[in-house]
Amino acid sequence: MVLVVEDEAALSDVVQAYLAKAGYATAGARSGLEAVERVRALSPDVIILDLGLPDLDGLEVLRRIRAFSDCYVLITTARSEEVDRLVGLSVGADDYLTKPFSVRELVARVHAVLRRPRVESGIASSGTVLTFGALEIDATAQEVRLAGRPLPLTPIERGLLMTLSHSPGQAFSRRQLMEIVWGDSWVGDDHLVDVHIANLRRKLDETAEYPRFVITVRGIGYRMGKG
Ligand code: CA
């Protein structure tokens, strides 16, 4: 899923149409605050972020997003002289495009960042591979494999699984998981955790009724199962 953060409606529509044609699911946000909310709700793989937004500056948006997400970010800006400065600042973006840009070029850049190996600041960084039955969690490679097959997890799903698996005896409350995975700046509905756990379970090929890996602990939250 690609989130297009752009206040010019016509440009946002064209970009989303091209991305859709290239096979990507898309969503749009017209302001900085909406962008932060949508990243939390949708966990996109890539964000195309316009720096000139009506409410927050794009860099402030990026700072807020980076508190809880390690998704790819491609910055677009009308200020060409800005790009060198941003690259020097290492603001945490993966690529930059100067406006006006060719939409075809933008789609090519999205393909390219998704192929790039990710060096993450990971939640867990132990060098070991943890094994729970058929599930392998490789914190160094930030990869999760089920029966040898890599699972395409979102950063939030991976964060939840990394957190649970690194303290397998411990039950975590929803609030604890939010603080660890989303960052302590987040105040909101604990049930967002349940939504992401449900998605994670689907990818792990298990249900809440018959869990192998993510066990519900009544009255508390979740803990890791033996697999
Ligand atoms: Ca703009």
Image (cartoon, rainbow, N blue to C red):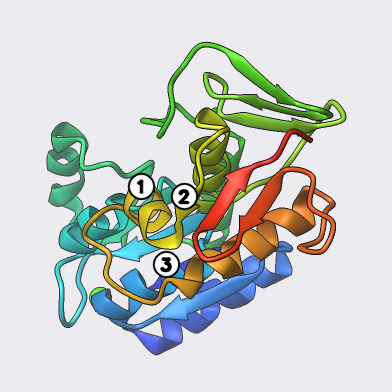
Is residue 84 at all visible to an observer of this figure? Answer: yes
CB contact under 8 Å: marks 2 and 1:
yes
Mark whose residue sits in front, 3 or 1: 1
> Which dot marks residue 121?
none
Q: Residues within 10 Å of mark 1 (few under 14, many from 20)?
A: some
Left or right: residue 193 compared with residue 225: left
Amino acid type of the residue that numbered disc 3 sits on in the rendered structure: Arg
Amino acid type of the residue that numbered disc 1 sits on in the rendered structure: Ile
Q: How many marks?
A: 3
> Which dot marks residue 180?
1
Q: Is residue 188 above or below residue 95?
A: below
Question: In which quadrant of this rendering is ligand 1 seen?
Answer: bottom left
Instruction: Identify the residue shown where x is 21% and y is 76%.
Output: 53
- For the C terminus, the quadrant is top right
Where disc 1 sits, the SS reads helix
CB contact under 8 Å: marks 2 and 3:
no
In this figure, which residue is indicated by the disc labeled 2? 172
CB contact under 8 Å: marks 3 and 1:
no
